[in-house]
Amino acid sequence: MNPADLRRVTKARERLVPVVAKEFGPKARFIHLFGQGRGMLAGVVAEIPEQPLGTDELPLLAIVQYDEVTGAVRVVDREFKYREARSVGRDVALLDGEGNLRLREANGRERLLARGVGGDLFPAAKGDALVATLQTSASHKHETSVGIIDLKGQVKVLADGPGVDATPSISPDGRTVIFVSGRTTVASFYVTDVDGAEPRQLTNVGLENWMLFGGPPKEFVPPPVSSHHMEWLSDDVLRYNAGGGAFWTLNVRTGAAAPDLGGDK
């Protein structure tokens, strides 16, 4: 992890740990950070499970808000019933364990936006919509699509290839949507737009799963670990967490990608 990212995470931990212990008890832990800046949210578990969870099991979370700028922390919801949360303008989108996406408005009112939402929430910069992974079928958890959900609750599918289409993100200008798909057997970035244009493969073009045996080739671009640690540096360049403390940048026009080594500043 480059120095700037390490300091960012360390600062968040210093602020959140004592508040979580005070508000939720000494066994509670924050385990996820959602978003950046003033709208950053954190997911809190009641306690860390003694036994590792299965691949498809997710702990249900309470939600707190952490202002990266001021360091202020406030409780959004004390109930341990959410899988994800993201700030959408002044409001908060909350995804519960049943796949129901609700919007809690700044005035405290809450309304249902959509059902059958799988996760990977990423809000548009204007705060008027979110992109998300959608559950194609309750009986086929490994068949997912990518869609955009506006604040009126209208859902539009943008990409639905065979298998998993997931981990979407939307550019600051609100036009370009990137996501990850395994439709070529290698997890790769694809690009579409909010009108649902035919997706185009951006990374790992020509690679097949067997080519990764024994270690990926030098041209392999790793997928992101989640949509929660993606940030746009411009309308064309996305920065994302590839796991293991490594961040990459991706040009969504050209497909050019490279490790972001950062600097000590």
Image (cartoon, rainbow, N blue to C red):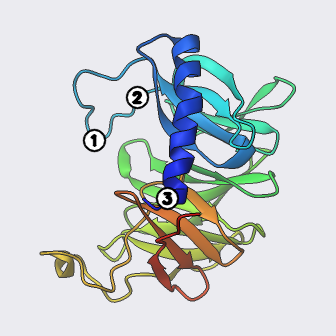
- The residue under label 2 is 59
**Kind of residue sitting beneath label 3:** Pro
Residue farthest toward the left in the current orientation of the protein: 214
Q: In x, y percent, where is residue 9?
A: 52, 45
- The residue under label 3 is 3
Q: Earlier in the sequence, mark 2 or mark 3?
A: 3
Q: In x, y percent, where is residue 217?
A: 24, 83
**Mark 2 crowdedness (10 Å alpha carbons): few <14, some 14-19, many ≥20:** some
**Kind of residue sitting beneath label 2:** Pro
Q: Work out whether 170 lies above or below 59.
A: below
Name the residue: 49% across, 38% down: 32
Q: Horizontal placement of 224 versus 124: left or right?
A: left
Q: In x, y percent, where is residue 260?
A: 49, 72
Which circle marks residue 16 in the picture? none
Name the residue: 64% across, 21% down: 77
Distance between mark 2 and mark 3 Cα atoms: 30 Å
**Kind of residue sitting beneath label 1:** Thr
Q: What is the number of callouts on the image?
A: 3
Tag in front: 3 or 1: 3
Distance between mark 1 and mark 2 Cα atoms: 11 Å
- The residue under label 1 is 55
**Mark 3 crowdedness (10 Å alpha carbons): few <14, some 14-19, many ≥20:** few
Look at the image and tell me in which quarter the C terminus lies: bottom right
CB contact under 8 Å: marks 2 and 3: no
SS label for mark 3 = helix
Distance between mark 3 and mark 1 Cα atoms: 31 Å
